[in-house]
Amino acid sequence: MTVVAPPPHDESELLIREARARQRRRRLFAALVSALAAAAVVVASAVLFRGSRVEPAGGPTPVASLLRCHSADLRLVGRFDGAGTGQVRSTFTFTNVSATRCTLRGWPSMRVVLPSGRAALAQLLRNNGADRPLLHRRVVLRPGGAASFEVLSSDRIGLSRPCPAVREVLVTPPGARVGLRVGFGLDYCGPRFLALAPVVAGRNDHHWL
């Protein structure tokens, strides 16, 4: 029978130190892997929710503290709404596509892009058909909520000159700086024949009547 002699005392101490060093390296490696995984989750979340503002965990933000809607928060569409008494009515609707509430108040800015490439600015409609001032209260848009404004243009009846057809408009939300382009057809007969009302809540605006 062969008997293996135990290692000398110094060699035993060396083996113990090496074992402890390997254990520390394994712990450091595990901590590094966990840290990298956590960082990857943070980066992925930032990419996923970039450009969206989220309501605080304590509850909805008070209305008085809500920010104005930015152009990036909104989607814009326009539709023909009827004609009569020499005017064509169109409704343009903002939809909040962000993750939180925001507000709109007052008149947007609208420019029409003419066939020549020149842009023409629409006037602001400040009174209704009874010559009363149009109200322009603040509108709160929840995520998915909508606000709209009415645009009045000419139907060309009774005019002695042709009106160039417009195929695109540029609308800047109230208080914003960046315009939203939308394809939309209307006839531009001059600045006196293109006016828009202030923003109201909902997808339909007949408040100017």
Image (cartoon, rainbow, N blue to C red):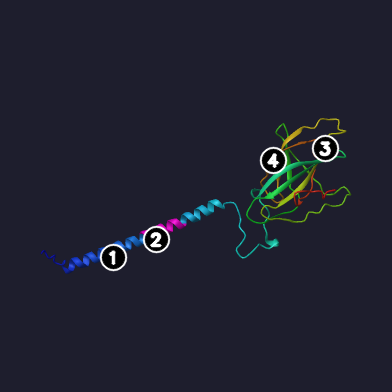
Q: CA distance from mark 4 to mark 1?
A: 68 Å
Residue labelled with disc 3: 154
Please tell me which of labels 1 and 3 falls first in the chain: 1
Looking at the image, do the residues carrying marks 4 and 1 touch, with CB atoms under 8 Å apart? Answer: no
Let me know if residue 172 appears in the view. Answer: yes
Range of the magenta residues? 29-38
Q: Note whether 77 is above or below 187 in the view shown.
A: below
Q: Note whether 77 is above or below 20 in the view shown.
A: above
Q: Residue furthest front?
A: 1
Please tell me which of labels 4 and 2 falls first in the chain: 2
User: Type of residue at label 4?
Assistant: Val
Identify the secondary structure beneath mark 4. strand
Residue labelled with disc 2: 31
Q: Which mark is residue 88?
A: none
Q: Main secondary structure of the magenta part?
A: helix
User: Type of residue at label 1?
Assistant: Arg
